[in-house]
Amino acid sequence: MRSRRHILDSTLRDGAQTPGLCLTREQKLKIAALLDAGGARQIEAGVPASSRREKETIARIVENRKNAAISVWGRLVPSDIAHAIDCRPDVIHVSAPVSHTHIHARLGKDEAWVIGRLRVCLGLIGKSGATPSVGLEDAFRGEPRFMEAVADTLLDFGVKRVRISDTVGVALPGAVREVLTRLSSRLGDGAVLGFHAHNDLGMAVANTVEAAKHGCLYADVTAGGIGERAGNCDLARLVAASSDIFDWGMTEAAAFKLQRDILETLRPENAWLPDAVP
């Protein structure tokens, strides 16, 4: 029996950050419908705090979905969470930086600020009725002791959905195993883990397969691997690489067809997009 794993498609959030790509509302709604019908377990529909139009589009996606859970993404900013709650998604994902570089150099904050803001945001999500999900941003350059402190905060709030993010694409499979083993030990039984890969070193698919082997139930993907910089984990290539050991809720042929249909939705104005098949 193949182990069951789930596709979390982020084409509408991280994929939409591809340089030069601008998705219309009609394209977003069509892509969401394709994913919903095509077997994606969860659709990351966007960032509600980015604009009023984005919020309206996400709300439409939530209304129209039939099968997939709909999630939205926010920073450690209470107003981001308020915008997310307005969309009434199933899951609200908040991204918590865990590396010194992201906390101190990028944000000009410290670890205490991260923990404090995380507590505030989780409190708001808890009152909304949505399922909270927390991403460990830049986890593979993070300080292990601080990541344990974040995990303890999640336990305080009963949060079991955690996404490990290789935000700048520096991880190799050995590091994926190490971080997942440490985090699983801290969170204990019942943790629902996800993995978010970037492809800067060309390792997004390999790292995601490794994560799935070591307890991650959710794999973040985008159609054709599109996304910021070198992109994300390629939906169809992930399924093709691991369908002999995991049931992703779709066959390899279905994954390539779904990816082709999504990429065709983005053409012809974006003819430079990758092909759906090798």
Image (tube, helix red, strand yellow):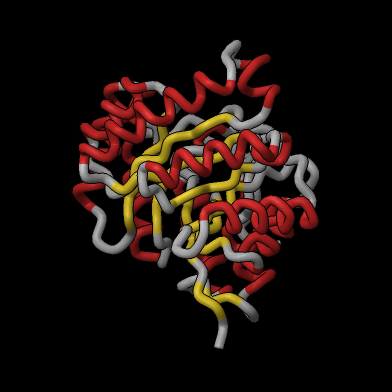
Percent position of residue 243, x then y: 61, 76
In depth, the one of 99 and 172 nearer the eye is 99
In depth, the one of 109 and 266 nearer the eye is 109
Q: Which residue is drawn at 60% across and 68% down?
A: 239
Q: In this view, does 6 lie to the left or right of 121?
A: right
Q: Residue furthest top?
A: 108
Percent position of residue 43, x then y: 40, 51
Q: Which residue lies furthest to the bottom in this view?
A: 1
Say which quadrant the N terminus sits in: bottom right
**Considering only vertical position in the picture, is 111 above or below 239?**
above
Q: Is residue 123 left or right of residue 19?
A: left
Q: In this view, does 198 lie to the left or right of 60?
A: right
**Considering only vertical position in the picture, is 131 above or below 270?**
below
Percent position of residue 15, x then y: 53, 40
Percent position of residue 82, x then y: 27, 26
Quadrant housing residue 98: top right
Q: Which residue is drawn at 58% across and 75% down?
A: 246
Quadrant housing residue 271: top right
| Residue 263 seen by the camera | yes
Count of number-bearing discs:
0
Say which quadrant the C terminus sits in: bottom right
**Considering only vertical position in the picture, is 226 above or below 240?**
above
Q: Which residue is drawn at 62% across and 54% down?
A: 234
| Residue 27 seen by the camera | no
Q: In this view, does 15 lie to the left or right of 146?
A: left
Q: Residue at x 61, y 28 (%)?
A: 19
**Considering only vertical position in the picture, is 38 above or below 195?**
below
